[in-house]
Image (tube, rainbow, N blue to C red):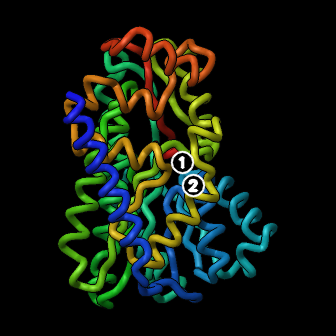
């Protein structure tokens, strides 16, 4: 057993070293002022942070979200903080991307307004927190509609333009929850696994045709999205652990940091990035030792706390004291909070 863990540790070290060396290789810069980016879920959280970052680089923005008033507030924020210099550089597009025709309208509106499209960032999402027995089938359908099919529909609407011009970037905000399963977020996890697989496959198909596809797998992020999450089961306890994890600096990454990392990845044409060290390690350990990861509950330990406990540190102590507990109430995630 010790030899097995030593081998895994060596592989993780080798993987980290290889990743570091690859990051040192000079890369081409793909982004430039005057390009046009669509950001879905762009009115708040990570979507708004991305709008700030891309806007500061001189990229023209198309922000899509369901709430028109929230979009207007987002524009005021962008102008007020100097991320965008002119209102004419931003198109606000209220829409419901669960409807396939809305995705087509979004792409058409961007092309009509700016005459070009260079970047599509699929960030819209929802999250429902609770144990499996309290998740109705509709929760899975809703998660797939927003977290998966909305992205796919936008991609298929934009793809003819990208292929025609033989250039473009597609950015899919997936999740660490699309790499390894996390308890109490099963609808979200199922949809994010689907998006991650689709995104990786799309990259393989399009990389030699001038279209770059970047899969983003963040851990927890402090986006404020936890207030928009839905809760089932023991709602008070589910809210307690979820909101604690989503707001704890040492557990959740800052949204500005995440937006900067994503901007750099798109600029460099990266195929995939994982944000936060614990998410990176958890994903790689799960890939090397999937059964061990599940038996030890490493996903839960790395990312979440136990409902009803007062701190993540206390939760960890309890886990190590009592060993693996199959029915422990745990988990993590968000709408613009991407787990």
Tell me what residue is drawn at x 72 percent, y 67 percent.
Answer: 78
Q: Quadrant of the C terminus?
A: top left
Marks 2 and 1: CB-CB under 8 Å?
Answer: yes
In the rendering, at what x and y percent does residue 189 appear? 33, 38
Q: Nearer the viewer, residue 222 or 321?
A: 321
- 290 is higher (above) or lower (below) than 262: above
Dot 1: element: loop
Give how far apart the Cα atoms at labels 2 and 1 are.
Answer: 5 Å
In the rendering, at what x and y percent does residue 269 appear? 39, 77
The residue furthest top is 322
Per the rendering, the mark at residue 46 is: 2
Dot 2: element: helix
In the rendering, at what x and y percent does residue 146 appear? 39, 47
Q: Is residue 154 visible?
A: no
Mark 2 packing: few (<14 Cα in 10 Å), some, or many (20+)?
many
The residue tagged 1 is 336
């Amino acid at each position: 057993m010790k030899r097995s863990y030593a081998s895994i540790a060596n592989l993780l070290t080798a993987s980290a070293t290889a990743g570091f060396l690859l990051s040192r290789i000079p890369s081409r810069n793909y982004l430039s002022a005057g390009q046009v980016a669509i950001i879905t879920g762009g009115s708040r959280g990570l979507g708004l942070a991305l709008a700030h970052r891309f806007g500061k680089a001189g990229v023209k923005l198309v922000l899509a979200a369901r709430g028109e008033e929230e979009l207007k507030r987002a524009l005021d924020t962008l102008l007020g903080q100097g991320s965008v210099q002119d209102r004419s550089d931003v198109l606000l597009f209220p829409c419901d991307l669960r409807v396939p025709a809305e995705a087509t309208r979004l792409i058409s509106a961007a092309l009509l307004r700016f005459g070009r499209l260079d970047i599509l960032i699929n960030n819209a999402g929802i999250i429902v927190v609770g144990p499996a027995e309290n998740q109705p089938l509709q929760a899975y359908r809703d998660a797939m509609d927003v977290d998966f099919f909305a992205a796919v529909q936008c991609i298929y609407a934009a793809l003819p333009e990208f292929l025609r011009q033989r250039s473009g970037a597609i950015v899919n905000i997936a999740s660490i929850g699309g790499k390894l399963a996390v308890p109490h977020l099963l609808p979200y996890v199922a949809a994010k696994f689907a998006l991650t697989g689709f995104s990786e496959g799309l990259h393989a198909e399009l990389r030699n045709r001038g279209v770059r596809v970047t899969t983003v797998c963040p851990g927890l992020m402090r986006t404020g999205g936890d207030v928009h999450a839905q809760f089932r089961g023991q709602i008070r306890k589910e809210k307690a652990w979820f909101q604690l994890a989503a707001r704890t600096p040492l557990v959740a990454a800052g949204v500005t940091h995440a937006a900067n990392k994503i901007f750099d990845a798109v600029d460099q044409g990266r195929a995939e990035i994982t944000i936060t060290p614990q998410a990176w390690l958890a994903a790689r350990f799960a890939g090397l030792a999937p059964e061990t990861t599940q038996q030890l509950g490493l996903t839960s330990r790395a990312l979440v706390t136990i409902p009803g406990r007062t701190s993540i540190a206390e939760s960890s102590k309890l886990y190590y004291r009592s060993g693996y507990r199959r029915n422990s109430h745990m988990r993590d995630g968000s709408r613009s909070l991407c787990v």
